[in-house]
């Protein structure tokens, strides 16, 4: 069994629109190959629209949901025209997260899949997270079953994006959860330096770790909660940004980078993970 699919993803940190063409094959097990991929930086207008989407009225948000769907459709249509793949079985579109509050039983990723289908005339699947949340999950990480099927040779799959999250097997059951914010905070802290992100951690290296702030971050109740659990921009606005008063921005970058590293290493060590998959790299983690 062989099929080709295109995936669309927009991260909460607004780094850009990721588009990927992949080939999937199942013999005794599933395998995949990335054939083409690109990240399209958002024009300033679209970055601003998505960044402010959580403040829109219901009517304005519905209009943006439709408009962004057509934007996604036109973007993937240009991708197809550029690479001319022979056959595409489907398009899988995550959309862009506006609200994520699983404790209230809702999440919202905008970008109407029906608009993508109208632009491309291809089957589209979308709205991946909602049913999991209605069934008492957290809708994050996105596809732990995909990790299970495609990366079974690893102890875990670790993602570093707007938020860090992990999926792994515990007692023969696949579990998954968010660990800590990463780029959603670091990118915001890089903005005063006219940077969209802190490339290679160059800015953070210039700062000093604020130990009292680091201790306060590491003591946040979320880190003591059992899985399933996930994070959203709402939590960052309520629990992270208010702690950043009267601290130099370079020191904030250094401190929050350390905080993310502490939380990620804690999860890896607690679960005794030695071999895990991170952004197409095989990493061996000493215990």
Image (spheres, helix red, strand yellow):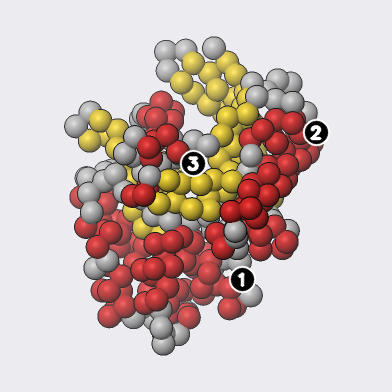
Residue bearing the label numbered 3: 280
Does dot 1 land on a helix, a strand or a loop?
Answer: loop
Number of numbered discs overlaid on the protein picture: 3
Residue bearing the label numbered 2: 81
**Local crowd at mark 2 within 10 Å, few (<14), some, or many (≥20)?**
few
Does dot 2 land on a helix, a strand or a loop?
Answer: helix
- In the image, what residue occupies the spot 54% across and 12% down? 1
Are the two marked residues, 3 and 1, in contact with CB atoms closer than 8 angstroms?
A: no
Q: Earlier in the sequence, mark 1 or mark 2?
A: 2
Is residue 95 found left or right of 208 in the rendered image?
A: right
Measuring from the top left, give residue 2's x and y in whole percent: 57, 15
**Local crowd at mark 3 within 10 Å, few (<14), some, or many (≥20)?**
few
Measuring from the top left, give residue 133's x and y in whole percent: 38, 40
- In the image, what residue occupies the spot 55% across and 72% down? 190
Does dot 3 land on a helix, a strand or a loop?
Answer: loop
* Distance in Å between CA atoms under marks 3 and 2: 26 Å
Residue bearing the label numbered 1: 195
* Distance in Å between CA atoms under marks 3 and 1: 26 Å
209 in relation to 279, above or below: below
Res. 100 visible in picture: yes
């Amino acid at each position: 069994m062989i099929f080709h699919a295109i995936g669309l993803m927009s991260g909460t940190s607004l780094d850009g629109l990721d588009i990927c063409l992949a080939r999937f094959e199942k013999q005794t097990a599933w395998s995949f190959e990335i054939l083409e991929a690109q990240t399209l930086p958002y024009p300033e207008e679209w970055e601003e629209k998505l960044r402010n989407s959580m403040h829109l009225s219901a009517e304005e948000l519905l209009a943006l949901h439709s408009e962004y769907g057509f934007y996604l459709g036109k973007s993937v249509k240009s991708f197809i025209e550029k690479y001319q793949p022979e056959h595409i079985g489907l398009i899988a579109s995550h959309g862009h997260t506006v609200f994520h509050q699983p404790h209230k039983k809702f999440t919202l990723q905008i970008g109407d899949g029906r608009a993508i289908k109208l632009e491309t005339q291809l089957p589209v699947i979308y709205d991946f997270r909602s049913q999991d949340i209605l069934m008492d999950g957290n809708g994050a990480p996105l596809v732990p079953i995909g990790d299970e099927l495609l990366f079974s040779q690893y102890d875990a799959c670790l993602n570093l994006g707007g938020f860090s999250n992990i999926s792994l097997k515990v007692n023969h059951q696949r579990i998954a959860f968010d660990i800590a914010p990463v780029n959603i905070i670091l990118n915001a802290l890089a903005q005063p330096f006219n940077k969209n992100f802190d490339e290679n951690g160059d800015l953070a290296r210039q700062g000093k770790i604020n130990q009292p702030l680091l201790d306060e971050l590491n003591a946040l109740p979320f880190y003591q909660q059992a899985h399933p659990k996930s994070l959203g921009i709402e939590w960052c606005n309520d629990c992270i940004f208010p702690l950043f008063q009267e601290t130099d921005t370079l020191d904030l970058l250094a401190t929050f980078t350390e905080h993310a590293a502490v939380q990620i290493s804690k999860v890896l060590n607690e679960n005794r993970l030695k071999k895990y998959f991170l952004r197409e790299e095989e990493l061996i983690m000493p215990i």
